[in-house]
Amino acid sequence: MLELAILGFLYDTPLHGYELRKRIAALTGHVKPVAESTLYPAIKRLEKAGLLDRATEPGSVAAPRHVLSLTEAGRRELHRRLAEPDPRDISDENRWFTVLAFLRHLDDAAAQAGVLRRRLAFLEEPASFFYDGDRPLRAEELDDPFRRGVLTIARATSRAELTWLRETIASLGG
């Protein structure tokens, strides 16, 4: 998820590490804060793999700063990751939002629709947070108001996403 976010933000424009960290935190920080000890090793891995370039620019007030940009190989890697997301990128809501935030960079509407169809198929599978044996429980079957709340909120969110997915897939011609 972190590497995808780095590639996605740098697709738009070169950024220095601090600005990149702020943008990633705005996208995912409410779920998982981005620590420097996590971000900078990920940047180094991507740079070593030839997906990022680093240039030094004079600082406006302080020391020079390192500006990161995507290489052509980095652009191709972003397209690959968007076109073929890992199954966890489809099933995990937070990872899904990261894919969704950058799916516009995938230039092929049919490929975009294909990714959305995968999420749609996942959401259409019967599921619950609570089970009676192998049978998923519905909110109406629970006496616990808090667990019922979890399922009620999740159902409303899923319905909204299902509607959006179907409309967007149709608008992409798929």
Image: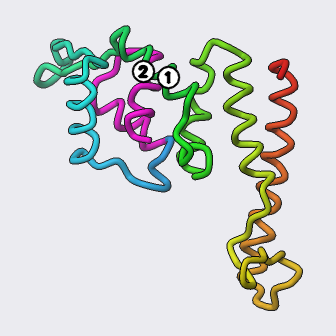
Q: Residue at x 43, y 14 (%)?
A: 75
Q: Which of the two residues, 59 or 136, is positioned nearer the viewer here?
A: 136
Identify residue type, mark 1: Arg
Q: In percent of the image, x 44 and y 41: which residue is there? A: 1
Question: How many numbered circles does the render carry?
Answer: 2
Which range is magenta?
A: 1-26
Quadrant for the C terminus, please.
Answer: top right
* Residue at mark 1 to residue at mark 2: CA–CA distance: 5 Å
Query: At 45% across and 17% down in the image, what residue appears?
Result: 11
- Could you tell me if the residues under marks 1 and 2 are in contact, i.e. CB atoms within 8 Å? yes
Q: Which residue in the structure is indicated by mark 2?
A: 77
Task: Please identify the residue farthest to the bottom as the structure is shown.
Answer: 143
Instruction: Determine if the magenta segment contains residue 14.
Output: yes
x, y percent for residue 117: 75, 35
* Relative to 133, 174 lies left or right: right
Which label is found at residue 80? 1
Residue 51 horizontal/vertical position (percent): 31, 19
Residue, x 75% and y 63% (percent of image)?
A: 154
Tell me residue 14's x, y (percent). 35, 16
**Label 2 crowd bin: few (<14), some (14–19), many (20+), radius 10 Å:** some
Q: Which residue is at the front of the view, 90 or 31?
A: 90
Task: Please tell me whether residue 22 is drawn above or below residue 126 in the rendered image.
Answer: above
Question: Outermost residue, front direction?
Answer: 134
Tell me if residue 27 is in the magenta stretch: no
Asked which secondary structure carries label 1, the reply is helix
Dot 2 amino acid type: Glu
Q: Is residue 24 left or right of residue 160?
A: left
